[in-house]
Image: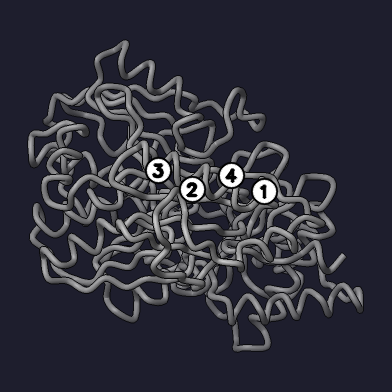
Amino acid sequence: MSTKIKFGTDGWRGIIGEDFTFDNVRICAQGVANYLKETGTPEGGLIIGYDTRFASEEFAAAAAEVVAGNGIKVHLCPKPTPTPVISYAVVAAKADGAIIITASHNPALWNGFKFKSLDGTSAPHPIINQVEKQIARIISTGKREQLPLASAVKKGLVDYWDPAPSYMKHLKSLIDLTPLRRSQLKVIIDVMYGTGAGYLQALLQGGKMQITEINSERNPLFPGIQPEPIAKNLIKLSNLVKEQKANVGLANDGDADRIGIIDEKGEFLNPHQVFALLSLYFLEVRGERGPIIKTVSSTDMLYRLGELFQVNVYETPVGFPYVAPLMLEKNALIGGEESGGYAFRGHVPERDGILAALYFLDFMVKTGKGPSQLIDYLYAKTGPHYYDRLDFPLPSHKRPTIIDRAQTSPEYIAGVKVTQVDTTDGFRFVLADGSWLLIRFSGTEPLVRLYAESSTKEKVAKILQSGKKFLGL
């Protein structure tokens, strides 16, 4: 049992009814409660929220019963709520942290348990290690507290609180929405049946901007898609952008902490392009300065922008438990990762797909450029950079063999000499022409991922195929 409750890069996830059960959720909640009680007096309480997945509100209620049973105050969200809204609420309410029932972008069969620390960020690894030790102890002893939800509400240990109003007010302090509302942009928003439904519409309505929202109803099956805002899941959005001659298509994942963008031609902007564009927006359009925090799987374009605007760029392993602490330490301007999650100074140092969408729209309005024109503008400064990623299922019995192969470090990839090997997170092979291949094992799913960046799409394809052959996949 203990091996099934192992936190990855952002929480613990499992298949509903198999690993992700009420009993295991209660064990995780007790582990968090034990950690809070052993490390201090949790006077601010915990916020508990959930997404639109099957039975998420019931799992959240089960977690609330355990936390309340330990005498810790719970602020329970009354409806599915985006992860960034809850993250900000931790800071706004001066809570001790948050539990979020969500599997983010995973398929419909999955659900998950995220723990946010008191600064609203994904709990860093030292904290997660302590929580996991508590979980192992609970599994061993079976000791767990629980108070029925109705009794907890009656005793004042649980109240219902909607953090959306304070979040929306905060976003309006970060960006002037009036020029956006006055613009005549035609925007289509795909919320992918997730928690982001209605947020961008509410923030941008009341002007000349034309906004259409799709896939906004709650449907835990996520029909026809996986709620991850990548090209293969945004075909409907892409087609609508072209059919309706929209200026841009925006998408958020299941818990709205990531963003995907479709340009005016129906083409998908990859997360590297979006990260670099958002960085350029802050550095040039807003004229702000500060470090950029990237992960090992993020684009080298950020280094070019750092050189151009004379700001430092720092690199971390994949995952916001690494990115967020460095953002706080360096007072970073922006932090992000290859999966489409970006965080910004002045806000919680945690991914926010809703705020990222607003900033991107502001970039368009301030420059008068469409997304494809912004890419041309970016490449004029950094040179062209192309990227792709391949994911392969990785059964546990094959993992040691694949790791052994990755450790052998090939001399050439796609006919180009390997000049550097970086093992910060996985195995990244830097090639003589500046291209790179990263082999990395997912921290949340049984997958091995191959990432590549180069100066042409053709080179990227060759590098990925060479990496696939190298691993014997």
Residue under label 2, please give it. Answer: 82
Query: What is the number of the mark on residue 460?
Result: 3
Residue 41 occupies which quadrant of the picture? bottom right
Q: Residue at x 11, y 31 (%)?
A: 182
Tell me residue 113's x, y (percent).
Answer: 66, 58
The kind of residue on which mark 2 rests is Pro
Is disc 2 in contact with disc 4, using a CB cutoff of under 8 Å? no
The kind of residue on which mark 1 rests is Gly
Estimate the spatial distance between the alpha carbons at disc 1 and disc 3, rounded to whole Å: 18 Å
Residue under label 4, please give it. Answer: 391
Q: Residue at x 72, y 63 (%)?
A: 152
Q: Residues within 10 Å of mark 2 (few under 14, many from 20)?
A: many
Is disc 3 in contact with disc 2, using a CB cutoff of under 8 Å? no
Residue 127 in view of the camera? yes
The kind of residue on which mark 3 rests is Val
Please tell me whether mark 1 or mark 3 is closer to you in this view: 1
Depth order, front residue of 37/2: 2
Helix, strand or loop at mark 3 = helix
Helix, strand or loop at mark 4 = strand
**Of marks 3 and 4, which one's residue comes earlier in the chain?**
4
Estimate the spatial distance between the alpha carbons at disc 3 and disc 4, rounded to whole Å: 15 Å
Q: Residue at x 62, y 49 (%)?
A: 103
Is disc 3 in contact with disc 4, using a CB cutoff of under 8 Å? no
Depth order, front residue of 438/49: 438
The kind of residue on which mark 4 rests is Asp
**Of marks 2 and 4, which one's residue comes earlier in the chain?**
2
Direction from residue 46 to residue 373 in the image, left or right = left
Estimate the spatial distance between the alpha carbons at disc 2 and disc 4, rounded to whole Å: 26 Å
